[in-house]
Amino acid sequence: MSELLKKSGLLKRGGFLLPALLLCVLPFYLDAFWLRIGLFSMAAAIGAVGLGVLSGTAGQLSLGHAFFLAVGAYGYVWLAGEPGPGLPPAVAAVLAVLLAGAAGGLFSPVAGRVKGVYLGVATLALVFLGHHVLLTADSVTGGFNGRSVPPLELGGFTFAESDPELTVLGVPFGAEERLWYLGLALFALTWFTARGLLRGRPGRALVALRDSETAASVMGVHVAGYRSAAFVVSSMYAGLAGVLLALSFRRVVPDYFSLALSVDYLAMIVIGGLGSVAGATAGAVFVTALPLLMTRYADQLPLVATPGSGDGSIGPTEASRYLYGAAIVVILLYAPDGLHGLARRTRARLRRRPALTDPPDTGATPRTPATAARAKEHTP
């Protein structure tokens, strides 16, 4: 028994260490385009995990996730830049995440008392209100043209292009390579904190709240309090994702944080699987990478026009939205628990397959167990 436990522990460690090692060595082999896709995917995964906690685990529908992403991104830009307080970038990043959490806290009384589609409509108002503020508050946001993003500095190390150029093992490390490891660290922090939250007492309380408010309140769960807390935690994850997105884009503009972005995040958690950290990550990678890949290879894809061609064909962005819209329909029809549930069922079937195979035919007549019930004989 102890040997089996040791083997299972080694397998679990290998399941984490091997992907982590692979992700760490990728900047030495991939060019800037693929690293940029990875950065955007990691930022989207952080935000999707936060929305998964709110919508997938707590059962609270939110269409305002783009608003809290904008609070994190613009909060960092204003706090670290000029005009603005000009704080150290690391301090500005932490304060931007806390600012997003504070914005979620201000809205949490509504989230604590409203649920379902009514909460969705209420959070939808945040997106339009936030977009209006981003366009009109020129001194803070830069208006329609947005603002450039100050690079992040930690201990004298800058996550941007530097002079002289940094070289590691003969590979030049530019902004994408440096930000890659920052994104990995932030994503790892999100992964382990979210899994710990969902597997602990708060996660069980949120699941009980999602399944039945009456049963949860009978068990001692403070319904309004846990709803509000889930909204604040989700907002902080979104703020962290906004900071990483701003650093990756190097310029933030209001049009990016629109309703379409909130819909994208809903698509991520639905495709990946509601209430699952791994599922939210898989959905984020799919929804984020698909339009970027289609944009790059548009000239090789049928029925897809290259960007700026103006020939009336479907652009790569629209085509990607059609594709993952169709993916949502397929997921809802055939795998309601998303890619994570599909992968879990596939692993379970592969594990059961050796046990379900027929035993070899030895030619011996099977013996009837002694405890088996015998048929009654007819009494003449």
Image (cartoon, rainbow, N blue to C red):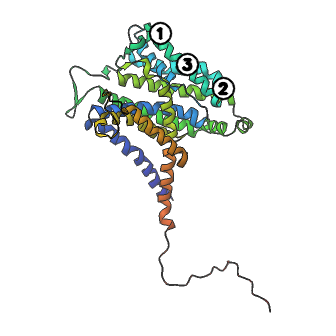
Residue 112 position, x and y percent, is 66, 26
Query: Residue drawn 44% across and 8% down?
Result: 138
Query: Mark 1 touching mark 2, by CB under 8 A?
Result: no
Residue 281 visible (yes or no)? no
Residue 123 position, x and y percent, is 58, 24
Instruction: Say which element carries label 3.
Output: helix
Q: Amino acid at mark 1?
A: Thr
Where on the picture, by quarter, is residue 308? top left
Which mark identifies residue 144? none
Counting residues from the N terminus, which is met first, the one under dot 3 or under dot 1? Answer: 3
List the residue tagged with mark 3. 103
Structural distance between the alpha carbons of marks 2 and 3 = 14 Å
Instruction: Say which element carries label 2.
Output: helix
Structural distance between the alpha carbons of marks 3 and 1 = 19 Å
List the residue tagged with mark 1. 136
Q: Amino acid at mark 3?
A: Ala
In the image, residue 354 sits, relative to residue 140, either above or below, namely below
Q: Amino acid at mark 2?
A: Gly
Residue 296 visible (yes or no)? yes
Would you say 317 lies left or right of 118 here? left
Residue 132 position, x and y percent, is 50, 14
List the residue tagged with mark 2. 112
Q: Quadrant of the C terminus?
A: bottom right
Instruction: Say which element carries label 1.
Output: helix
Query: Residue drawn 35% across and 16% down?
Result: 150
Residue 145 position, x and y percent, is 38, 13
Query: Residue drawn 52% across and 26% down?
Result: 65
Would you say 26 lies left or right of 51 here? left
Query: 312 or 161: nearer the eye?
Result: 312
